Amino acid sequence: MIATVTLNLALDLTYTIPEVVWHAANRVTSVHERAGGKGVNVSSVLHALGHETIVCGFSGGPTGEAIAADLAEAGLEAVLTPIGGHSRRTVAVVDGAAGDATGFWEPGPTIEPDEWHAFLRSYDNVIADAAAVVLAGSLPAGIAVDAYAELCRRAREAGVAAVLDADGDALRAGLAGRPALVKPNRDELARAVGGGDPIAAAEQLRTAGADAVVVSRGAEGLLAVTAEGRWSAAPGESVAGNPTGAGDAAVAALTIGLVERRPWPDRIADAVALSAAAVGAPLAGGFDEALYRRHRDHVAAEVS
């Protein structure tokens, strides 16, 4: 089983518009609402691929109730810690003309100390049966910046591989917990180390505690920097659509590869293919199966 942790769970709203005209009224052609947050998107992809997964996080207020109901309807097992505050919403506006999306993320609730301790007790119970745990997304107010480091340490002590997908101080502090893998995008990597060559920057994250680093580079694919070597892979064709969940799909593929101990070139190629297929799906947490198969047949990793 692969557990996912989304400390700032959200109810995702996706608006699709033929062409966004900023500073003007826009008519929305379709609206989708579903439970979201980076870890939820990872679990959705894992579930679609036939892997057992559990969603962990906080849930509060009417939005939290809607998140829990949607997870249940989607067939995703969830262990949610109740809180007094209200869970957040996010809005993604998909611009059909641009083939891209713009996101608006609410900050989320403030987590009280007793709520955090209740979550830790639940987390320890969940990872006792897990092969890996994915720690993804932003930290809500009230939680210490080193929260991911603590969750990584607890996972490592339980013999569970931790995959960290975070940004800024949460990523930098989380490295102290020695995660098995971190997956920043190009901008997050630059913010973590102050810029520079991607390979050298990734090596800095490894020196700071990560066993391996995989950097997502948009249309240029993925770069992996590990103790076993360095590899890169890119999709064979560009894909227009909603890139919001592409990185989460890559994390799902990388975590499967980690659990199944696949060779790194296979992990990277599969993650690139699944990430491209996620762009071709209308909603984050989904992927186009035909596109996934087509890319998987043509993507190959190369030594970097």
Image: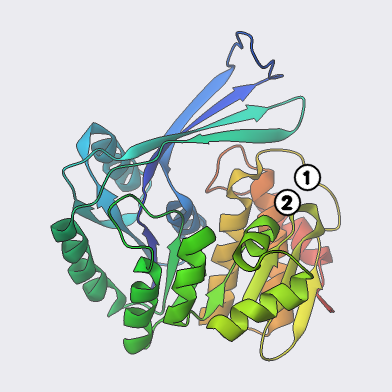
Mark 2 is on which residue type?
A: Leu
Q: Residues within 10 Å of mark 2 (few under 14, many from 20)?
A: some
Between 227 and 132, the one lying in front of the other is: 227
The numbered mark at residue 57 is: none
Q: Residue 162 vs residue 117: left or right? A: right
Separation of disc 2 and disc 1 at Cα? 9 Å
Q: Residue 42 vs residue 197: left or right? A: left
Corner quadrant of residue 194: bottom right
Give how far across and how far down residue 217 sits, in percent.
74, 59
**Marks 2 and 1 in Cβ contact (< 8 Å):** yes
> What is the secondary structure assignment of the residue under circle 1?
loop
Would you name the residue on which mark 1 appears?
239
Relative to 293, does residue 177 appear above or below in the rendering? below
Q: Residue at x 68, y 67 (%)?
A: 215
Relative to 22, does residue 255 appear above or below in the rendering? below
What coloring was used for the rendering? rainbow
The numbered mark at residue 291 is: 2
Corner quadrant of residue 22: top right
Q: Residue at x 26, y 46 (%)?
A: 110
Give how far across and how far down residue 87 sits, in percent.
30, 40
Q: Residue at x 26, y 69 (%)?
A: 123
Mark 1 is on which residue type?
A: Val
Would residue 210 be visible to someone looking at this image?
A: no
Give how far across and how far down residue 109 sits, in percent.
29, 43
Between 214 and 294, the one lying in front of the other is: 214
